Image (cartoon, coloured by chain):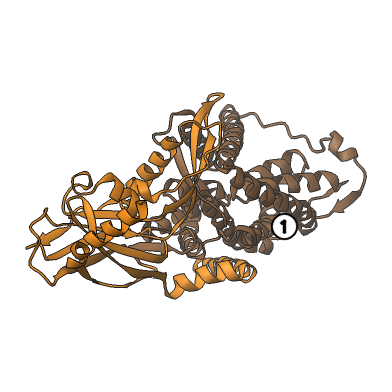
Amino acid sequence: MQIYLPIAEVSVSAILLFGIGGLVGVLSGLFGVGGGFLITPLLFFIGVPPTVAVATGANQVVASSISGVLAHLKRRSVDIRMGIVLLIGGLAGSAAGVWVFNLLSRLGQIDLVVQLTYVVFLGLIGLLMLQESLRAMRRARSGTAPRVKRHHHIWVHNLPLKMKFRTSGLFISVIPPLIVGAAVGVLAAIMGVGGGFIMVPAMIYLLGMPTKVVIGTSLFQIIFVTGFTTFMHALTNQSVDLMLALLLILGGVVGAQVGTRIGARLNAEQLRVLLALLVLVVSARIAADLLLEPSELYSLAKVKQ
Amino acid sequence: MKWLALVVGVLLAWPAAAQEEVISGLSQDRISITANFEGSDLLVYGAVKREAPIPETGVLQVIITLEGPSGPIIVRRKSRELGIWVNTASVEVDNAPSFYAVAATAPLEYILSQTEDLRHKISVVQKIRSVGAPQDILDSLAFTDALIRIRQTEGLYGAAESGTYLKDQTLFNTSFDLPANLVEGNYIARIYLLRNRQVIASNQSTIYVRKVGIERWLYTLAQDQPAAYGALALFLAALAGWAASEAFRRLRR
């Protein structure tokens, strides 16, 4: 069943879109990530123009994060105060990101920048995750418990403007969360992702937040950042395709339920290795596009009137 | 003296041109792009109207073209820089149709002279207007070729496979295959009658291609009221997210 997307102005198979949404939903249910990093490149592959893929990807992440954060709110694993600080940085970053995005689209370099950020960030995160989970698996096998350091005292904790974050049990300066929020906001706007896969490690390693509140808090602020990104893209370049977004969201909702059930039967460390491998495969696939000679050297772009 | 020759020429040519006229029809003059639009067929048919017997000079040939709305396009070229493939050169083509198909009774080069092609802009190359290529680009023709090649692979430029069927030098028809990735706008079907590689009569009609229903509504809203459209996108996403979590909770119970 073909469906004509009114903004992308292409006709694609509705089943395929539902399938992509579903696949990403399964992964988000399995691993607790938004899945934006997969949806945007998959949309590129099926011929949706990059600007539409990025803006619509952000819209899909809004839906999946809201669905996720509601569950976390019930478990009280959201640090709302920290979320708001991250958010203030995030909105500023997102506005800057949309501006950069529009500038780069005019220069014709947006595809390159989107692809490069994907290769670099997915590659780095994938490798770090793989290393970390392999180490954990080896440790579990040899039976030695990892050493836990409770309070890292690094330079970020010595900055001014300290604030108390009760849910996280932290008393730190607001400057590092603002910077982390802004950096992720820029990336979210350029890559069309929520940025959870960057936010989560940054919260644990840079801000020293306890793991149990990290995912909920990250989802909480991602809702607003991707919501703002979606709105800005709709406002400045009319590139959000509602028809496309709805199909992806529908697929994602069903997929997330399937994913959570599969997830319950798998071991957490194996899951992490799987996610790391998946992230690396996506990163390698995009890198190959940049490194290998394309079959068509020329490309067409509409001129904005 | 030049103008005199011209007047004489026109007077001499006049009766020949008026001898044969085109009457044409379309299977549809309105094409609606709906949510499940999968492309469409357009049949162009017609007849040659004559007051006199069929002229003996030359064989009658028919060319039918279908042209979509035109606009400027940027063509970019990649080259390898520091090991990766990057867009390094670009040419702005001032005007190129979003869709163009030609159907004829024989290959164009046999039935159409080059001067007539230039005058009536019939072949696809004539349809693409590219004036100012940047000075550092010496091979601007490669860019127009690429534009034609890419649009051909997308099914947007090309020849109608069936060609034009002509019966008894009077009745003709052809059918165009309109792809699913059609852009909305006014499409123009043109019919040219030729003898001795010269156009002797022509005729054109318009087909209105429009998004309708929800497609129309979404597109207009996105363009005219982007703020409301953005808000709607967020509202639907929030609703879907909330509904998913509710459904999930009930299923768990």
Image location (x, y in percent) of residue A19? 41, 55
How many residues crowd mark 1 within 10 Å: few (<14), some (14–19), many (20+)? many
Image location (x, y in percent) of residue A299? 46, 42
Q: Could you tell whether B199 is left or right of A242 in the image?
A: left
Name which residue lies at 55% across and 42% down.
Answer: A111
Q: Could you tell whether B146 is left or right of A114 in the image?
A: left
The answer to whether any part of residue B121 appears in the image is: no
Image location (x, y in percent) of residue A133? 58, 34
Q: Quadrant of residue A64?
A: bottom right
Give the residue at the far right of this rendering. Answer: A160
Name which residue lies at 25% across and 60% down.
Answer: B176
- In the figure, the shade used to draw chain A is brown
Image location (x, y in percent) of residue A189? 64, 50
Name which residue lies at 66% across and 45% down.
Answer: A187
Q: Quadrant of residue A203?
A: top right
The answer to which of A196 and A44 lies nearer the viewer is A44
* Residue carrying label 1: A78
- In the figure, the shade used to draw chain B is orange
The answer to which of A267 and B184 lies nearer the viewer is B184
Q: Secondary structure at mark 1?
A: loop
Does residue A53 sit above or below B134 in this rendering? Answer: below
Residue type at tag 1: Val
Q: Quadrant of residue B31?
A: bottom left
The answer to whether any part of residue B141 appears in the image is: yes
Instruction: Indicate the chain on which mark 1 is placed.
Output: A
The answer to which of B33 and A226 lies nearer the viewer is B33
Q: Looking at the image, how many numbered discs can be counted on the residues? A: 1
